[in-house]
Amino acid sequence: MELNTLKPGPGSKRPRRRVGRGIGSGLGKTAGRGHKGQKSRSGGFHKVGFEGGQMPLQRRVPKRGFTSMKVVGEVLLSDLERMKADTIDLEALKREGVVPHLATAAKVILSGALTRKVHLSGVRVSKGAKAAIETAGGSVVVPEVQPAPAPAPQKAGSTAKDKKEEKDAKDTKDKKEKKDAKDKKDG
């Protein structure tokens, strides 16, 4: 086989369809567009997703969910093996290009081998990876997860209905005081 004898495999390249070139081609006259109608005319296509004025599907379907802005970088034990630093935190991982610069956190998982001593701090670690790091003589300082603050206890009976009743009672009291003050002024 020589470069000048190379050619595509049989059936991989088909000839271009030439429409509107006579009845013998099978695509003459209307050129596969059919008779009349908007689609048969030149320039007769509307925007993608247009449904003739009916509310299109992409607007009928409700918006749902959100895109998480958290980027958690995945770190393998073999990545830690290749790193130059002995003390490893999120900044060191970013500096050496192990995790993306946009990463807000990183997690070390058990994949690959670790033979040298490393000290991890502020990086999440799987159980298996933690055991492997400690077996190699390293240490892991896991970041403390701050528990969500407990909601403040509500007063007994402070429902929306009770608040409305309190407001109504206050309004009635205010009206009565205004009326009394007016009667006193007039009388």
Image (tube, rainbow, N blue to C red):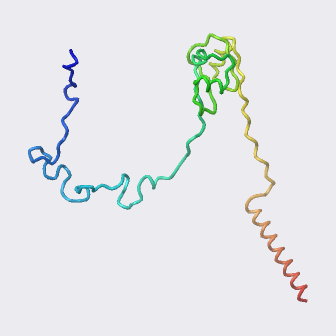
- The quarter of the rendered structure image containing the C terminus is bottom right
The answer to whether residue 153 is left or right of residue 42 is right
The answer to whether residue 72 is left or right of residue 122 is left
- The quarter of the rendered structure image containing the N terminus is top left
Q: Who is closer to the viewer here, 83 or 57?
A: 83
User: Could you tell me which residue is drawn at 74 percent across and 35 percent down?
Assistant: 146
User: Could you tell me which residue is drawn at 58 percent across and 19 percent down?
Assistant: 79
Q: Estimate the x, y position of residue 174 in percent, counting from the top left.
A: 83, 74
Q: Quadrant of residue 53?
A: bottom left
Q: Estimate the x, y position of residue 132 in percent, counting from the top left.
A: 64, 15
Q: Estimate the x, y position of residue 20 in percent, counting from the top left.
A: 15, 48
Q: Is residue 36 above or below residue 186?
A: above
The total of numbered circles placed on residues is 0
Q: Is residue 18 above or below residue 96?
A: below
User: Could you tell me which residue is drawn at 66 percent across and 15 percent down?
Assistant: 133
Q: Name the residue at the bottom extreme.
A: 187
